Image: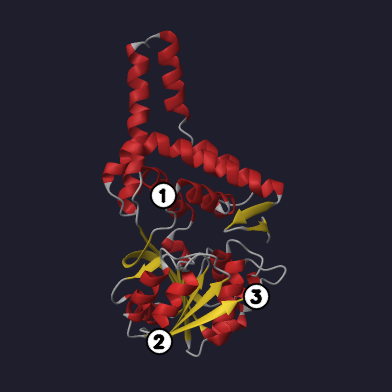
């Protein structure tokens, strides 16, 4: 059986949906929501939910200890209160679909894994979300291949904190969230520690298992991705430079500048450039299909590359500066 743990800070728009989706999972015996000093209606909504969701317990955090990232302290607090053999950490903006917990337990059994994680379906309701999020996730899929992560013979490791289930004994053996208390990218860090300990992990796509809408405004989207994209993509100046070289739409911009300044280009050059442009779009179409995004998103290839480069550059700058901000708090960046 499973103890589900939900760290929550200012999640009035999401918390009811997350709790209700967990309540519908027969394998989830208890739901522990850790309210991390929310200043919105999260606490009020949780009081209403406690009255009708028998599995639900709410823990209130009054202060964040020095040296901890808020989400990690909330997760660790929930884990200490949990009673079951499996701990399922779920972000408050994530909704589990019917059968999700059963599927996770089946994948754990099939792959002899002590950690199971999925990359949930991404709900996108604004143009900015449609432009950036698929591009980010196709790049993440290049860096964190499911096949390599799930191969016990390879050191590659990754997980998504929106849905991360881990066996209690393995969690305690690696030190739990206390071992990554200062890490903003705690999910990948936990996965690396589990795999380095000689235990198996399973990481897979979350279509039909869970869905999430991460950011509802452009400001939240910008702050959210700039806090960790640099580290996700390698966290070094070399990995940053390589990523910019590979993803920034250099050719498209050069073509546009030439067209505007020269008023036209020789036919042979136009043909050559068109061939390369078509190749870039086809590659993005392949990546979209592999990651189960609609092919219509290909129309955003150029603005996606531009916005992605801006977000990655801002993320790198924040890490070079030494701190990132998230939900009203500031944390040291690049802690390893």
Q: Is residue 194 visible?
A: no
Calculate the distance from the C-alpha at mark 2 to the C-alpha at mark 1: 34 Å
The label number, if any, that marks residue 133 in the structure image = 1
Where's residue 198, x and y in %? 56, 77
**Residue 18's spot in the image, x, y percent?**
39, 71
Q: Tell me which colouring the rendered structure shows.
A: secondary structure
Can the viewer see residue 277?
yes
Front tag of 2 and 3: 2
Circle 2 residue:
55
Q: Is residue 100 left or right of residue 74?
A: left
Q: Nearer the viewer, residue 56 or 276?
A: 56
N-terminal of the pair, mark 2 or mark 1, is 2
Residue 7: horizontal and vertical position, in percent? 52, 72
For residue 110, what is the image quadrant? bottom left
Q: Where in the figure is residue 89, as x and y percent of width and height?
A: 48, 74
The answer to which quarter of the image holds residue 334 is bottom right
Element at label 1: helix
Query: In this orientation, which residue lies closer to the viewer: 37 or 167?
Result: 37
- Where is mark 3, residue-wise? 178
Q: Is residue 219 above or below residue 278?
A: below
Q: Residues within 10 Å of mark 2 (few under 14, many from 20)?
A: some
- Position of the N terminus, as image quadrant, is bottom left
Q: Where 54 falls versus 246 (above or below)?
A: below
Q: Residue at x 38, y 81 (%)?
A: 105
């Amino acid at each position: 059986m499973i103890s589900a743990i939900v760290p929550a800070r200012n999640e009035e728009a999401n918390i009811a949906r997350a709790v209700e989706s967990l309540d519908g999972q027969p394998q989830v015996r208890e739901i522990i929501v850790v309210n991390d000093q929310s200043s919105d209606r999260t606490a009020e909504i949780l009081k209403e939910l406690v009255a009708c969701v028998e599995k639900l317990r709410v823990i209130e955090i009054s202060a964040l200890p020095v040296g901890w990232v808020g989400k990690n302290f909330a997760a660790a607090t929930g884990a200490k209160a949990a009673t079951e053999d499996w701990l399922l950490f779920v972000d408050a903006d994530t909704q589990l679909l019917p059968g999700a917990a059963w599927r996770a337990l089946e994948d754990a059994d099939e792959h002899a894994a002590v950690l199971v994680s999925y990359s949930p379906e991404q709900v996108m309701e604004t143009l900015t979300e449609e432009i950036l999020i698929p591009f980010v996730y196709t790049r993440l899929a290049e860096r964190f291949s499911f096949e390599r992560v799930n191969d016990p013979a390879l050191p590659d490791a990754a997980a998504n904190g929106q849905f991360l289930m881990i066996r209690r004994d393995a969690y305690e053996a690696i030190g739990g969230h206390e071992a990554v208390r200062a890490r903003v990218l705690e999910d990948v860090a936990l996965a690396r520690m589990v795999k380095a300990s000689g235990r198996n992990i399973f990481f897979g796509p979350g279509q039909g298992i869970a869905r999430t809408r991460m950011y509802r405004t452009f400001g939240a989207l910008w702050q959210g991705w700039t806090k960790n994209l640099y580290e996700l993509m390698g966290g070094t100046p070399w990995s940053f430079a390589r990523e910019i070289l590979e993803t920034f739409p250099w050719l498209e911009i050069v073509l546009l500048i030439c067209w505007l300044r020269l008023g036209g280009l020789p036919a042979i050059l136009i043909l050559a450039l068109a061939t390369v442009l078509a190749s870039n779009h086809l590659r993005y179409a392949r990546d979209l299909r592999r990651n189960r995004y609609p092919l219509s998103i290909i129309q955003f290839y150029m603005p996606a590359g531009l916005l992605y480069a801006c977000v990655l550059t801002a993320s790198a700058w924040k890490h070079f500066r030494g701190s990132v901000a998230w939900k009203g708090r500031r944390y040291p960046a690049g802690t390893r």
